[in-house]
Image (tube, grey):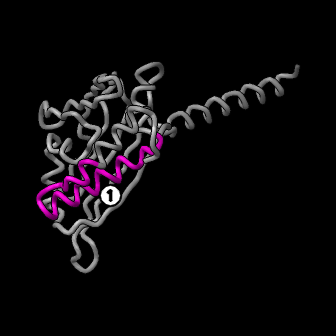
Amino acid sequence: MKVTTKRMLVLAGTAAAGTAVVYAMRKPPYSGIKLKKTLLIDRPPSDLYRFWRDFENLPRIASILESVEVLDGRRSRWTAMAPGEIPIRWDAEVTRDDENEMIGWRSLPGSILETAGYVRFEPAPGGRGTLVRVALEYNLPAGKIGAAIASLFGRRPGAHVEELLHRFKQLMETGEVSQARKTRARRTESSARTGTGDF
């Protein structure tokens, strides 16, 4: 093999390796389930931000959450109850905090659930309230725990985000969540746990 040919092969191999490295660097950290939902709420961004920034409020609007414990200004511990009364816990940190505008978060390395998300509070045109935009993505771990989390979210994971936003809207606009919506949320959880129902 000529020296020139060898050099060309080496250069080609180097270029391919470089391309693979660039692809790996650009590959998103979460390639699993991704959800995005938006809802108009008739309250100013500051009120909505203040409620959400206290993560311990979130189980009031997210039926799949058992509790959220704030550990410090940036870290918190989240607990959900999977079918069979299996507690799923993970720690998260705030990745972005723009007062009255946006909150971003992600699970800490080593958590049982890889997840990240954000909520944005955008003034609606004409002073008609606030557009609340929620984005969430997560990867399911392998094995029984992954199966438990999958059954927790059910066959339509987006329905939980929709329910969360509607409960958030009702709570912020009226000061309470209706009994009918609470009952529907419990049915949703029950369907997820028994594997029945399309929500």
Numbered range of the magenta stretch = 155-183
Find residue 127 and report its horizontal and vertical position in percent. Answer: 21, 77
Give the residue drawn at x 11%, y 59%. Answer: 175
Does 146 appear above or below 56?
A: above
Find residue 110 and report its horizontal and vertical position in percent. Answer: 34, 21
Q: What residue occupies the far right of the structure in this picture?
A: 1
Please tell me whether residue 174 belongs to the stretch shown in magenta.
yes
Position of 17 with respect to 177 (left or right) is right
For disc 1, the neighbor class at 10 Å (few under 14, some 14 to 19, many from 20) is: some
Position of 90 with respect to 99 (left or right) is right
Magenta stretch secondary structure, dominant: helix
Q: Which residue is mark 1?
A: 133
Q: Nearer the viewer, residue 118 or 179?
A: 179
Give the residue drawn at x 41%, y 41%. Answer: 137
Give the residue drawn at x 26%, y 48%. Answer: 183
Task: Residue 75: tell me if it is visible.
Answer: no
Q: Quadrant of residue 67?
A: top left
Q: Secondary structure at mark 1?
A: strand
Find residue 126 and report its horizontal and vertical position in percent. Answer: 25, 80
Find residue 8 and report its horizontal and vertical position in percent. Answer: 78, 30
